[in-house]
Amino acid sequence: MNKTILEVNGLSTKYITRFREDVYAVRNVSFKVEEGHSLGIAGESGCGKSTLALSLMGYYFAPLHYISGDIIINGKNISGLKPDQVRKNVLGTEIAYIPQAAMNALNPTRKVIRFIEDVMYAHGSKMSKKEIYDLARERFEILNLPADTLHKFSVELSGGMKQRTVIAISTILSPKVLIADEPSSALDVSSQKMVIKMLHDLMDLGFIKAMLFITHELPLLYNVTDDIMVMYAGQIVEKGSKDQMIFDPIHPYSKGLMGSILVPEDGTRNIKLTAIPGTPPNLKNPPTGCSFAERCKYATSRCKVYDVEYTELEGGRGSRCLKPEHELRGLYDDGKVDFSNE
Amino acid sequence: MSSKKEVCLSGTGVTKVFGFGSKKTVAVNNIDFQFHSGELVSIVGESGSGKTTLIKMLLGLTSVTNGDIFFMGEKRDISSHRKKKEYWKGIQAIFQDPFSSYNIFSKIDSVLLDCIHMRGGRRLPREKKLKMMREACSFVNLKFDEMTNKYPFELSGGQMQRLMIARIFLLKPKILLADEPTSMIDACSRATILDMLLKLRDEINMMIIFITHDMGLAYYVSDTVYIMEKGKFVEHGNADEVVLAPKADYTKKLLSDVPKIHEPWDFRKSGKS
């Protein structure tokens, strides 16, 4: 049994809009990530993936508010800390976050090395500039980034290079957990592969202990992470290893999601893509019962009334559906899940 | 799909050069192409390979430095605004970013009405126009009665892109240029948009030119795939041939960079659990 690096218990957060309405974007999320493992989070736009990422940092600023739950990183609970403490003691050293447009974070008037100095001094480093430079140079070389990048301005770098530079800067203090929120979706395929390779290297060399990778592109997730978790309406609907999730999903929503995969491989041309009709529920008033019931082809009247618990299955899997596993599998036997006839 | 192979759009020696002298950049370098009617063509390439410049030239939004473009067998003439408008009746586009494709001051009704007027339906009675608009909206699974009196920015990205397809449905052009129409929307709505485009193609037998950097998408939708590198077509042919048995090195590299699910990337050294 590996050591658990990140443990989240019943985390709920909400947004308060300027009309004083509450939007429950993350609802009772619990999961664990072990050392050396990576977890992928998939889901439609607006399902709470990015809000979960923000909430995990423990750094709440309006309109995002904390409701309940624990975030335990390497045995340390960070959920009750004040923003100031979080910034000093958690961000950068325990957790690092890379948003989608991370490359825009670089100030065009400063050289890359200055950002690294900033990060080090903000966390109370006593090193001299020369020592920091040596450290940064060494780290950049390990990660296959040219060392002269350190003396460049951000405008001199290409999109993929900028993104990799930002990743290198944000992991300079070797955080335990790295949260990558669609780090490659603004890049083309070749730069994307380089960014992904770098994240793998960081894991392999032990600079980061665990990684959360958020994207809506499932083939990419399959190539990056060990486990995949599917979110819908702020809740986890299914979790399992990547092979289980891509080739053998249990929950009707994940089944529909996996039916929208496009890859350039033999035999994928004749498959009919599944599209799930309808839109996700409004999280101002989360629906009673199963959140997916409204769009689910297999929903019964029970689904809309009873709250569904997340049930653990064998082998670390879990799914949130009223119907037991064997019953759902029976439903899929008639061929492909097709939501389009409704 | 059409059985007759009539050449719909073709070009010889099309070139676009930006800048002069030492700052000269050749975006599209002396390419020849022949697209047939009813065909679905994909142009795949990395960013900076000149895909969008080519599309802009085909649409007549930028001038062509050198070479000729032929539309329906005749040399294209867009020298005046009137001729350009006439040309645009036959060729239309869907762009990547639905949020900036619309005029924020015009309502959805007028967006659709404009299309009817462009097809010469200005004199039609109002009921007839409403019926056409309703039909177009139901084709893309939008409810016209919810749409009327709204502005495009009140819709979600997927809905906007579907409204764009409703426009195309009304305009019935010969050629549709789709410049990464699904890259800003998530995987789930992507399937809906693609299905609608394919349905529309069968309905009005138009030709679609699909611009993308996603090999999986190109392979799924297209009959013919063109691979573009640095302003040149390095490979073209039947989708199965190009994707499953690539010849050019660039195509091979592009295919190896696309995440796949049956042959995963191997970065990890052994010994990791």
Image: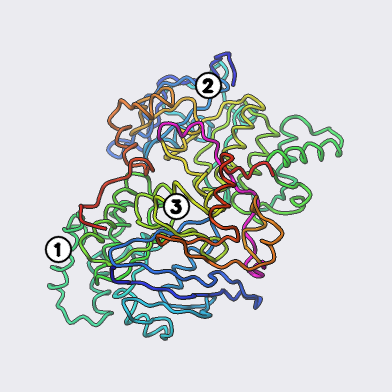
Q: Is residue A89 above or below residue A116?
A: below
Secondary element at image label 3: helix
Vertical comparison of B145 with A32: above or below = above
Q: Which mark is residue B9?
A: 2
Quadrant hosting residue A115 = bottom left
Q: Residue at x 43, y 69 (%)?
A: A31
Instruction: Give amino acid for label 2.
Output: Leu
Real-space Cα distance between discs 2 and 3? Answer: 44 Å
Q: How is the image coloured?
A: rainbow
Residue annotated with mark 1: A138
The percent position of residue B41, horizontal first and vertical second, equals 49, 27
Q: Please, what is the three-letter code of the amino acid marked with disc 3? A: Met
Q: Is residue A102 above or below residue B204?
A: below
Closest to the observer: A75 or A52? A75
Question: Tag 1: Cα neighbours inside 10 Å, few (<14), some, or many (≥20)?
Answer: few
- Left or right: B172 with respect to A252? right
Q: Amino acid at mark 1?
A: Glu
Q: Which chain letter goes with mark 2?
A: B
Quarter of the image with the N terminus of chain A is bottom left
Q: Residue furthest front?
A: A326
Highlighted magenta segment, given as a residue range: A265-288
- Please state the chain letter of the residue tagged with numbered disc 1 in the rendered image: A
Q: Position of residue B231 (x, y in %)?
A: 36, 31
Read off the residue under disc 3.
A245
- Work out whether residue A170 can be spotted: no
Of helix, strand and loop, which one carries label 1? helix
Could you tell me which residue is drawn at 31 percent across and 53 percent down? A196
